[in-house]
Image: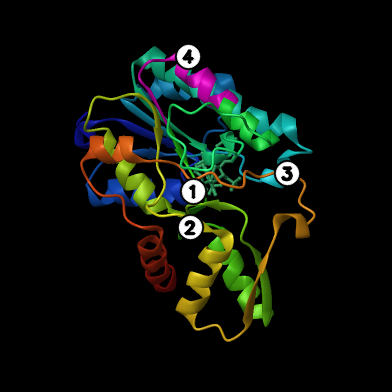
Amino acid sequence: MNIKHAKILITGANGQLGFDIRRILNNMGCDFVATDYKELDITNEKAVFDFVKRGNFDLIINCAAYNDVDKAEEDSENCYRLNAYAPFYLAKAAKEVKAIFITYSTDFVFDGNKGEPYTEKDKPNPVSVYGKSKLKGEVLVLNEYDKSIVIRTSWLFGINGKNFNTQVLDWAKKYKELKIVDDQISSPTYSYDLADFSLKLLKKVNFGLFHFSNDGIASKYDQAKYLLNKIGWDGNLYRAKTSDFNLKARRPNFSKLDSKKIESLVGAKIPSWQSGIDRWWEEYNAI
Ligand SMILES: NC(=O)c1ccc[n+]([C@@H]2O[C@H](COP(=O)([O-])OP(=O)(O)OC[C@H]3O[C@@H](n4cnc5c(N)ncnc54)[C@H](OP(=O)(O)O)[C@@H]3O)[C@@H](O)[C@H]2O)c1
């Protein structure tokens, strides 16, 4: 698809990923309609249908999601509305106007028991409401419309939003000792790189399910350590276990996504998570 001349709709455009999709499209000189909750609540099926029909879009990129993994355990209805049914409404509307539809999912669709990186062929088995809602969204979208792309990603951080990096920076300001878990392992992923590869994938005619995470494997402890070293924090960092904390939702222990499929289709090397944090840090400080 030639994005330059496409009519593009972005939903959830004010989040981390939405922000980076917008800045890349701006740099490419593309026109697009950016909406967030106020302009288009994607849980409203009729509003979605009317908006898409009126805009007659060629490409719809859904960046909206319910991402509060712990809150979702007690707020399952709202979580499913946004993560499962809303993408389904968008896929149906996209089908109506023959637009390509892209939406995003998560490494939390896996239970973490495989012990090596998950490919698109591995069977999901989510262990949280959040993971189940995202899987339901994937299935509804892919069954509804064959020009859909679902990209699973992990541990997203961007310059426009709150994430584990910003959380670590807040803690580092407040405390001299930090305990971070080393038994949750995946890969931190810079939303700019996800946005970049998503848009590059559109140049190829390829639909279906993809994995994208920054290259390399890290625990939450590794991620925090890398960032704390970078900022020259002079406190003490300790290893902890997930069971030390009273979290509402279960999380997979090992959910690294094997991203070779998108890498070889796009024909570019996926940057490492460390490079993602380096670039994030520079840009985060520049705003
Ligand atoms: N963040 C992660 O660690 C992570 C990990 C794996 C996968 N993912 C997936 O990656 C994608 C992008 O995530 P992200 O971190 O960029 O998300 P994000 O920063 O939370 O952004 C989501 C955006 O959607 C908006 N939104 C909420 N409800 C909406 C509604 N009903 N209609 C329209 N917009 C609505 C939010 O607005 P408000 O802020 O006002 O609610 C927010 O601007 C999502 O599919 C997410 O599930 C994220």
Q: Which residue is mark 1?
A: 14
Q: Which residue is mark 2?
A: 160
- The span shown in magenta is 136-150
Give the residue furthest to the bottom: 234
Question: Disc 1, disc 3: CB below 8 Å?
Answer: no
Question: Which residue occupies 30% across, 25% down?
Answer: 58
Of the two numbered discs 2 and 3 in the rendering, the one whose residue sits closer to the viewer: 3
Q: Amino acid at mark 2?
A: Asn
Q: Amino acid at mark 3?
A: Ala
Report, in whole angstroms, how far the alpha carbon at label 2 lies from the one at label 3: 25 Å
Tell me which label, 1 or 4, sits earlier in the chain. Answer: 1
Tell me which label, 3 or 4, sits earlier in the chain. Answer: 4
Left or right: 104, with 276 as reference point: right
Tell me which label, 2 or 3, sits earlier in the chain. Answer: 2
- Frontmost residue, 198 versus 224: 224
Of the two numbered discs 1 and 3 in the rendering, the one whose residue sits closer to the viewer: 3
Q: Is the distance from the Cβ of mark 4 to the nearest ligand 1 atom less than 8 Å?
A: no
Q: Quadrant of the C terminus?
A: bottom left
- Frontmost residue, 147 versus 10: 147
Q: Is the distance from the Cβ of mark 2 to the nearest ligand 1 atom less than 8 Å?
A: yes
Q: Which residue is mark 3?
A: 249
Tell me which label, 2 or 1, sits earlier in the chain. Answer: 1
Query: How far from the left and from the top, in percent, is residue 285?
Result: 43, 73
Question: Disc 2, disc 3: CB below 8 Å?
Answer: no
- Frontmost residue, 99 versus 52: 99
